[in-house]
Amino acid sequence: MPRILLVDDDINVLRALGRLIHFLPREVLGGEAEVECYAQPEAALARAAVCEFDLIVVDYLMPGMHGVAFMRRLNLMHSHAARLLLTAHARALEKIEAVKGIGPVEMMQKPWDEAALKSAISRLVTWRRDQLAARHGAAAVASPHNGLQALAAALTTAQ
């Protein structure tokens, strides 16, 4: 079940994003998504300090802190999270220059094309799920209990 953080100073955008995610098929998300919405970037950062998110969707232009500054600060806590930057204001070159050094970030224009946004969210959640599965797979291989689990499974099937 993915945890998704939405950050935008426009409450109507937060509602629209929340609805869009709510109506995505559960198999696309890997279960019911837990979505948290914040109109204040500082409040969202405070929450991210105590809670891990799989996907972060943030507006580029907000009062007090733009989306790239938000992602730079978030990167110190959660460099692994999938990220989507929404923008109605930044030019393409500004966006490309702005996100250098903060990891992989997808960008989408506002107003968004609903099918494209659904596809981006699905792709990012799947990427994050695959990333976690690979990490857990590597941990299982390295686990000292892995041999014991295999032995127990072999004994169970042999009986």
Image (cartoon, rainbow, N blue to C red):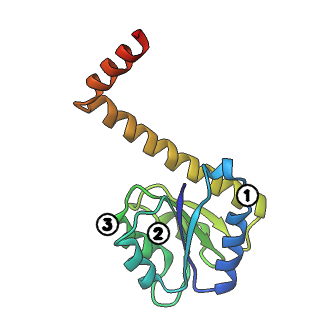
Image location (x, y in percent) of residue 157:
43, 14
Q: Going from the N terminus, do you reach mark 2 or mark 1 first?
A: 2
Q: Amino acid at mark 3?
A: Leu
Q: Nearer the viewer, residue 66 or 140?
A: 140
Residue 5 picture location, percent across and down: 52, 69
- Which label sits in the foreground, 2 or 3? 3
Can you say which quadrant of the picture contains the C terminus?
Answer: top left
The image quarter in which residue 76 lies: bottom left
Furthest-left residue in this view: 144
Q: Residues within 10 Å of mark 2 (few under 14, many from 20)?
A: some
Q: Position of residue 117 (x, y in %)?
A: 70, 61
Residue 58 horizontal side relative to residue 157, left or right? right
Say which residue appears at 46% left-offset and 90% top-offset.
64
In screen coordinates, is 32 left or right of 52?
right
SS for dot 2: helix
Given residues 57 and 156, the one toward you in this image is 156
Where is residue 115, by image quadrant? bottom right
Look at the numbered discs 3 and 1 and tell me whether their residues touch, using CB distance below 8 Å. no
Residue located at (46% from left, 82% from top): 41
- Whichever of labels 3 and 1 marks the residue nearer the N terminus, that label is 3
Q: Is disc 3 surrounded by few (<14), some (14 to 19) or many (20+) residues within 10 Å?
A: few
Amino acid type, residue under disc 1 in the picture? Ala
Q: Which residue carries the number 2 mark?
A: 98
Give the distance between the C-alpha atoms of the residues marked 2 and 3, in whole angstroms: 17 Å
Locate the N terminus by quadrant.
Answer: bottom right
Q: Is residue 143 left or right of residue 93?
A: left
Numbered disc 3: secondary structure: helix
Dot placed on the residue nearer the N-terminal end, 2 or 3: 3
Give the residue at mark 3.
Answer: 76
Q: CA distance from mark 2 to mark 1?
A: 22 Å
The residue singled out by tag 1 in the image is: 116
